Each structure stands twice: as C-alpha cells, then as structure tokens.
Image: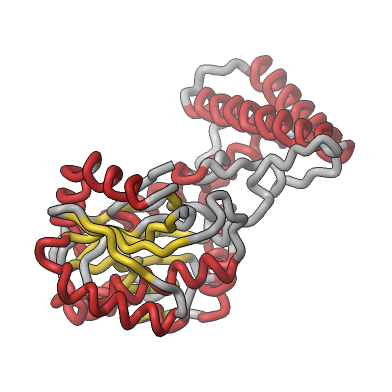
Amino acid sequence: MPLIIYAIFDSINYIDSLSSYVDALSLKSKIKLEIISTSTLSAIVSRTTDLKKQACQNDVMIYATIIGDIAAKYSILPMRYGSIVSSPFDVTELLNNHNETFVTLIKKITDKEEYSLRILYSHLDKEKNNTEDFVDLSQNVPNILQGNTDSKKYLLNKYIKHLSEEKRLQYIDKIQSIVACNLQTITDLIVYNKQTTTGFIVDAVFMIERSKKSELLDLVMQMQTLFSEHNVVLSGPWPPYNFSNINIG
Amino acid sequence: MDSDKILYYAGSADEIIEELEKLKPGIQGRINATPDNVESGLAKLVLTLIELIRKLIEKQAMRRIDGNSLTEAQIEELGETLMKLEKKMEELKDIFKLTDKDLNLNLGPLGDLM
C-alpha cells in the first residue's frame, strides 16, 4: 500500500518521545500515523490507497497541520505535500540513500524554528513615491530625450519608469542590508526571497534557536521604529520548509 | 496565512492582507493547454516569451540611453520601434483575450518569469 511521508527526524535522539506524540496526534487528526525507522533516521508516514491521488485543499491543510504540530515540539525535516512512495521498503531506501544529507540537514535545524519577516510598502509610500519620483526623476533625464516628437515622449516616459525602478531596487538593497545586519545578530541562517510583487521591500525567512524568540520580537520592534513608514509582518514559527528542500519526485 | 502565526505586525492590516493575497498560488501562472484550448494555451506561452524579449529589449535600450551612446536619429528610431512593438503586443493580447497578468509564468522556486 502506498505511503504518504510527512516528516523525517533523527531517531537516535527522538524516537521514544516522538512515538508517543505521533500516537496522540493520530487520535487528534483521525489519521493513522506510523513511524518507519532505520538505525539513524525515522519517517512519519500514513497509508493511502491512491498513489496518484488528486490533491484537494482539505488534504493539504490536514497534511500541513500535522507537520506544523510536530514541528512545534520537535526538530523535523518537513516533506512537501505529495511525497508519496509505493511501500515501506521505499521509505527505508529513501532514508538510507540520503542518510548523510538528511542527517546534515537535521543538524542544521535542530532546536531551531523558522520565521518569516516581510517589509512591505504602504499605500501611502506608493503614492508619495509616485509623485516624488516624477518630479525628482524628470530632472535627471538626458538632454537627448528632450523634444516634442512621439518617439521622444514615449522614450522619456519609459526612461522615467526605468529610473524609478532603479531607485526602488537601490532602496530595497539598502533596507535589505539593514535587516541583514539586524538579523545576523541572532542567526546566520537567512534566506531572502525574490520580491514576488512590487509591494515587497524585504521577504526574508530565517531559522533561530527556539530560546531566542523574545530576542527576535525585540529586534523586529526596533526595526519597525527604523521603518515606521512601512508595513512590517513577522510570522512563525513555521516548520523549516525553506531550509530543508527535500524533493523525492 | 493562519492569523495565529502572525507574531507581530505594524501598519495597515488591510494593506498587508491585500499584498499577501497576491502571493497565493493561482492558476494564472500555468500554461493550461488541453486538446480543446491548445490554441489559446500556445498563444499564451508564445506571447509570454515575446513579452519577455520585448522587455529585455526595452531594458537594453534604457541602458544605451544611460550610456549616452545614441544619436538623435537613433533615439527617434528606437522610440518608434519600441512604441510599435508595444502597440503590436496590445493587439495580439486583444486577439487572444489575454491581459498583462496572463503573460507571466510561475517558475516554482525561481519565482515568476516577469
């Protein structure tokens, strides 16, 4: 029978306490969770009838909740939804074949939690920037673009947008380096995500030791004072998805 | 995002939600080509690639303006070319009923193409 893999953990240190926790979680989630182990690693799995089951939102939510519950207490490597293998043998093979990689990843994330820090432009910023940009940037246009032809007017408009984008990227670099300096005082495990929308200034995920949560909160509040005109969001703790990219496809 | 996962926020909650909503994976980023709609699926893919190239050309043009390496005549020619290219793209988008939002591809962990 195919198996869904939820997470991988270090069996040497956690097998006893995690076994009883997984049993309790089975009752709570109404999904029969099992543990399959090798000498060093274990995987939390459940049986499924369908190897290529169509994903539905509810299943994804249950999957994420189970991983979230375990990660809140234990250092685990969370798997992505859809991590399905054909048999228990495939699970042990996966653990054995990638033993070194998994052990290294687990060491990296042990006793740490993932958090996300996002700094976003406010609507007020956007309006202010648009007006200021046009006035400021119009003064930096090369003489060759001055003129009344359609071509020049078109290029002038494009050029101002180009200057505005350059200015935005420079600003993002500046804010990102300030955030990096601050976060580096509590962790060196930081990943900056590409700005997926122009509303984002910083989109960072990082791992910190569980004991440093209040230190992090203080730090974020200090940062908010620095960037009082922007919207700041700190979320977490999350399972360490961004620091344990495991793809068994 | 679960609200209990928000540890701290400052600023407008509505604005934050609005921006975070944009991150939800949608179906716009996918090329949805099936035997029934292969033409529009293909059109979307081709136009996305053309748009990417058009934007790269535009960026290169801005760099050349920055570098002061263009003559009056070249500026006129460049402006006209870019203007026509943009106009042509608008026409093609109209024909295939595509919007700017459609002309993008989600490249998974690499983010969006544009």
Q: Which of A12/A138 is in front?
A: A12
Query: Is residue A221 positioned above or below B51 on the image?
Result: below
Is residue A132 something one can see in this rendering?
Answer: no
Residue at 17% from the left image edge and 78% from the top image edge: A215
Classify B85 as above or below A166. Answer: above
Measured as percent of width and height from the top left, residue A230 is found at 43, 71
Please, which residue is most extreme toward the left here? A13
Q: Considering depth in this image, is A208 or A81 the residue closer to the camera?
A: A81
- Res. B42 image quadrant: top right
Q: Nearer the viewer, residue A15 or B91?
A: A15
Where in the figure is residue A55, as x and y percent of width and height?
Answer: 59, 58
Q: Residue furthest right?
A: B95
Relative side of A38 to A227, left or right? left
Q: Position of residue A176 (x, y in %)?
A: 31, 56
Q: Quadrant of the C terminus of chain A?
A: top left
A1 shown above or below A162:
below
Left or right? Give the position of A127 relative to A45: right
Q: Is residue B75 left or right of residue A179?
A: right
